[in-house]
Amino acid sequence: MDTYALVKEKALAAQKAARKLAAAGTEAKNAALLAMARALEENEEEILAANRLDMDAARAKGLKSSLLDRLRLDPRRLDDMADGLRQVAALPDPIGEVIGGGRRPNGLTVTKIRVPLGVVAIIYEARPNVTADAAGLCLKTGNAVILKGGSEAIETNKAVTRLLAAAAAACGLPQTSVQLIDTADRQAVIDLIQMQGLVDLAIPRGSAGLIKAVVANSKVPVIETGAGVCHTYVDEDADVAMAVKICFNAKVQRPSTCNAMETLLVHRAAAPAFLPPMLAAYLEAGVELFGDETVQSYSPKVLPATEEDWAAEYGDLRLAVKVVGSMDEAMEHIAAYGTKHSECIVTENFQRARRFQQEVDAAAVYVNASTRFTDGNEFGFGAEIGISTQKLHARGPMGLPELTSYKYLIDGNGQLRS
Amino acid sequence: MDTYALVKEKALAAQKAARKLAAAGTEAKNAALLAMARALEENEEEILAANRLDMDAARAKGLKSSLLDRLRLDPRRLDDMADGLRQVAALPDPIGEVIGGGRRPNGLTVTKIRVPLGVVAIIYEARPNVTADAAGLCLKTGNAVILKGGSEAIETNKAVTRLLAAAAAACGLPQTSVQLIDTADRQAVIDLIQMQGLVDLAIPRGSAGLIKAVVANSKVPVIETGAGVCHTYVDEDADVAMAVKICFNAKVQRPSTCNAMETLLVHRAAAPAFLPPMLAAYLEAGVELFGDETVQSYSPKVLPATEEDWAAEYGDLRLAVKVVGSMDEAMEHIAAYGTKHSECIVTENFQRARRFQQEVDAAAVYVNASTRFTDGNEFGFGAEIGISTQKLHARGPMGLPELTSYKYLIDGNGQLRS
């Protein structure tokens, strides 16, 4: 079968499954999620064997160690995947929730209820944990999911998907609730994100390149996730000790995440007290620093920052640092280089804190806390399918309600429009 | 200036305006809306003169009369446009509304508030009333709008947009809050819907062809609007007299709208009592009927229905009619040919009414009322920018909240992620 026919067949099967899933009760969906968790645990050997095939092929291809680490499964990581499914089972089911409505003057009653989106396509890289995560979140919200993971993880994903689909089927839900596009043909992604009328939403998860390619080629609705050029602005009225701790945490605690800080902006008046201890802490932690001339004057180890540094999502222990003359200059910089993900001001000044939160255009705007908190679990959502950096449908961390749509039920007794 | 440069310049200006509009207060926005309404009334002669230029050119090009009628303005239609702006001014402002949040275990407070989308592009045909409508709705929700109307209306749109922008500026809001792409170059639409990072949402309003073209070419988020192949299913337990009235209203009251009925499905057991009076009423009203063999057996005036009829959005006094053996067959037909807009069952049976509403996948699912009620005003929204037929972000009639996004404000006192 050619790639287009393969993708279309899966999309049609997903649409059929979606109709059944939309009508499935919470108990059936939760039973399936628990069965899926058990299936991962009970078939550990089969999954790890498939993962070894992927790892061997990846090593032979010379994949770099950070990618090999993402690809690798072990018993502990498999347990985490199973636990994730159990946590999703424990969350409240958003489907069917009444979210609006009322009686109209003509006697019609309008009831707005949450419904599944239908068919969700997830396009991601070689991270097998996303396979179970995405499958669980979509099943809980009554959506059929079509997974297209990185080709390096294909054997692992095939094993995991087969087990998850079988577990769903054993609980009376459609086998095709969870499907994998299991071809290495890159055209499959294009075909998938152009299945208008069959795919209701595509979510790319991964590198900026992957996300850009999906946005550029998609003919179905897309939610952009993840690119995070996050700033922390240390105001002239910052508590210096607090600012040092927040900025250290935002950069160093887990620099590969999208909510980690990439550029530090410092008010000129705060620089003399703040920069010496801050730069020392960073240098001790192995952070490579790129700064403007003022920042460089504080340490010979600060390299000159270029235009690329202000726009960079390093994703590692590098940081750009700039001294600004005012909060307005900081906000201009953020508007010019930020990705509307997470931005922070450290200040004790009430009016500036308020203005910064109102005027900075980002999914999450912090006062006096690390940007690392932009995360579904930290916000109390219990789960997360990704972090949206667009403004349509969902913004910031996406939990279960963000995987739903709604419809209106209208009841009458013969009302006519005049 | 070439078209791309022109569009980019307007998009950049819109983005700048959007930052100011996001911070604008409700009183300033309402004052601008009222000033915009007055500007249309006080400059009636200027607008009508511009409209005459468009009408003359359109007649010379041989535009058909229904299109000429949409293009034509007169004092009454201008008054309606002004009244529309005043109605929007009277609606509650959704911006700033707190729609979620709480205190996290670590002491962080999270506040989810409504914010504008940013820059909204509206692509539409030669209907000058959309120009004022869209400008008003976007301004009220703090969005900068870029309008691209049909080239036949260009002189009218230029006059209207100039007056609206000047009125906004006179009230202290940016002149570029409301902008028109005033070139006839069709490339402008493509450029506009590919302005990633500058345009936050594109809404096409108009024919299926226009919507398709926007969806196929856009690289910014799009909301699809309008295509409506709506069905009414007359169940075996329908109240026949009510069914005749509902089906007549759904087809005849205003057949050009997207919520008008296009296909009538009749349970076999209901046909003998229902079809004779129904077909007679339709024929008397000049409705052209296309039916299957059973329907044809009731009247020699019923023409044979083809596959195209089941998929047709006639938009006029034509109707497809089919007899089905069960509600399941009706729902299968709706799933195969419907556009997920508005669907109706006429029945006195509780269980079937409930199942139909739960299982039919559409923005609005009716029991015992005309599908013609799918409309922002009828649902109590006070205004409508369009009717979404997709499931992402907005579904069904879109009012003011559907033109907003949200952001999270997070307040802390030095919280760090561990």
Image (cartoon, coloured by chain):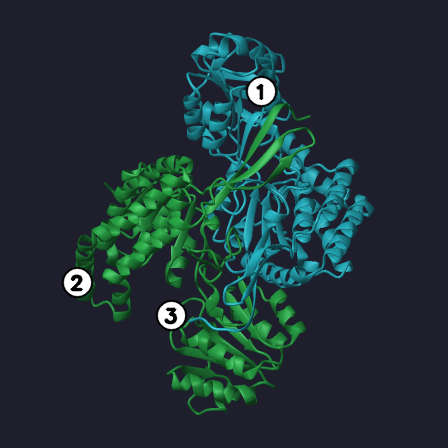
Chain colours: A green, B cyan
Q: What element carries label 2?
A: helix
Q: Is residue A82 left or right of residue B251?
A: left
The x, y position of residue A44, in whole percent, is 21, 55
Q: Estimate the spatial distance between the alpha carbons at disc 1 and disc 3, rounded to whole Å.
A: 59 Å
**Residues tagged 1 and 3 counted as in contact (Cβ below 8 A):** no
The x, y position of residue B293, in whole percent, is 43, 11
Q: Residue at x 33, y 38 (%)?
A: A173
Q: Residue at x 52, y 60 (%)?
A: B197
Answer above or below: position of A386 versus B283: below
Answer above or below: position of B287 versus A395: above
User: Hey, what amino acid is under mark 3?
Assistant: Ser
Provide the residue designation for mark 1: B247
The x, y position of residue B385, in whole percent, is 62, 43
| Mark sitting on residue A56 | 2
Provide the residue designation for mark 3: A256
For the view shown, which residue lies furthest in the right direction? B42
